[in-house]
Image (cartoon, helix red, strand yellow):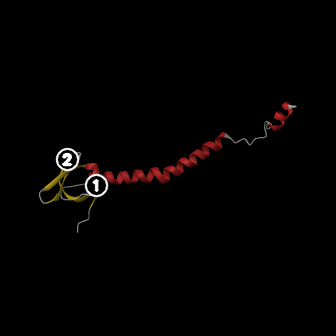
């Protein structure tokens, strides 16, 4: 009797919805494409623009750092920039910490 109840509750074989393995791969491909075009590609574009900005820095440019310091470039090196933030006040910051170049007023 107990065996009959267990057998009656078990699903019959072959009646489940079988999906092809290709539908899963297509679904994952669509998800990856969405992530690529919404997240990865714009981030790469911003990094490329920032790298171009850092390569085009020159002495005398007014810049702002990611920490909020405004100054004029007094010296350039490979990895550091010397900023003059006031008369006779100079600080060294890493080149990658330059957030942007200010437009001349």
Instruction: Classify 10 Å Cα crowding around label 1: few (below 14), some (14-19), many (20 and above).
Output: few
Specify the farthest residue to the bottom: 105
Residue 5: percent from left, percent from top? 84, 35
Q: Secondary structure at mark 1?
A: loop
Q: Secondary structure at mark 2?
A: loop
**Residue at left offset 65%, top offset 44%:** 23
**Residue at left offset 79%, top offset 40%:** 15
Q: Earlier in the sequence, mark 1 or mark 2?
A: 1
Instruction: Classify 10 Å Cα crowding around label 2: few (below 14), some (14-19), many (20 and above).
Output: few
Q: How many marks?
A: 2
Q: Quadrant location of residue 14?
A: top right
Residue 31: percent from left, percent from top? 56, 48
The residue identified by callout 1 is 67
Q: Nearer the viewer, mark 1 or mark 2?
A: 1
Q: Which is nearer the eye, 43 or 8? A: 8
Give the Cα separation between the discs numbered 1 and 2: 20 Å
Quadrant occupied by the C terminus: bottom left
Specify the farthest residue to the right: 1
Please say if the residues under marks 1 and 2 sit with CB atoms less than 8 Å apart: no
The residue identified by callout 2 is 77
């Amino acid at each position: 009797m107990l065996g009959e109840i267990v057998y009656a509750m078990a699903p019959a074989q072959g009646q489940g919805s079988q999906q092809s393995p290709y539908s899963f791969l297509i679904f994952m491909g669509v998800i990856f494409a969405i992530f690529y075009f919404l997240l990865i590609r714009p981030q790469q574009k911003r990094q490329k623009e920032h790298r171009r900005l850092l390569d085009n820095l020159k002495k005398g440019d007014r810049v702002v750092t990611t920490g909020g310091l405004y100054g004029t470039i007094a010296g350039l090196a490979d990895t550091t920039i010397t900023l003059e933030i006031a008369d006779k006040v100079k600080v060294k910051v890493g080149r990658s910490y330059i957030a942007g170049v200010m437009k001349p007023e």
